[in-house]
Image (cartoon, grey):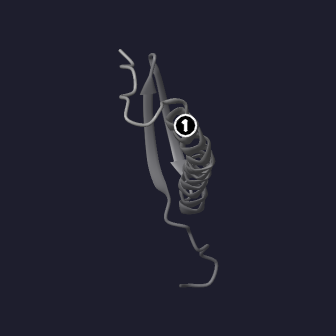
Amino acid sequence: MEEGEEETVNTCEFYLAVFGLDLYLPLDPHTIYYTLSTIAQTLASGLAVLVAIVLFNFNRANDALGNGKALVPEGQRAPPTR
């Protein structure tokens, strides 16, 4: 690099044509990195919440099955649910 020259960051050219708008956005690689990592973190946290809800409801479902079996006398079949 010679004296007086500035070091340039490798930019990503992003072209967006939506609803008749032609937008040219030169993006810094750091911007893309942080955007994609934020999206990944958001999806991971949403999945974690969904898994927690399902796991906590397994206990409730098992209790309901156990209570339902206790209501049916021995030797009889449970009534159909349809």
Q: Residue at x 59, y 62 (%)?
A: 30
**Pointer 1: what residue?**
70
Q: Is residue 70 above or below residue 43?
A: above
Report x, y in % for residue 68: 53, 32
Q: Residue at x 57, y 50 (%)?
A: 55
Other residues around mark 1 within 10 Å, as few (<14) / some (14–19) / many (≥20): few
Q: Is residue 38 above or below residue 53?
A: below
Report x, y in % for residue 66: 54, 42
Report x, y in % for residue 76: 38, 29
Residue sitting nearer the eye, 72 or 6: 72
Residue sitting nearer the eye, 22 or 19: 19
**Which SS class for mark 1?**
helix
Residue sitting nearer the eye, 47 or 54: 54
Q: Residue at x 57, y 58 (%)?
A: 37
Q: Is residue 35 above or below residue 75?
A: below
Residue sitting nearer the eye, 39 or 43: 43
Query: Which amino acid is tagged 1?
Result: Ala
Number of numbered discs visible in the structure rendering: 1
Quarter of the image with the C terminus is: top left
Report x, y in % for residue 73: 47, 32
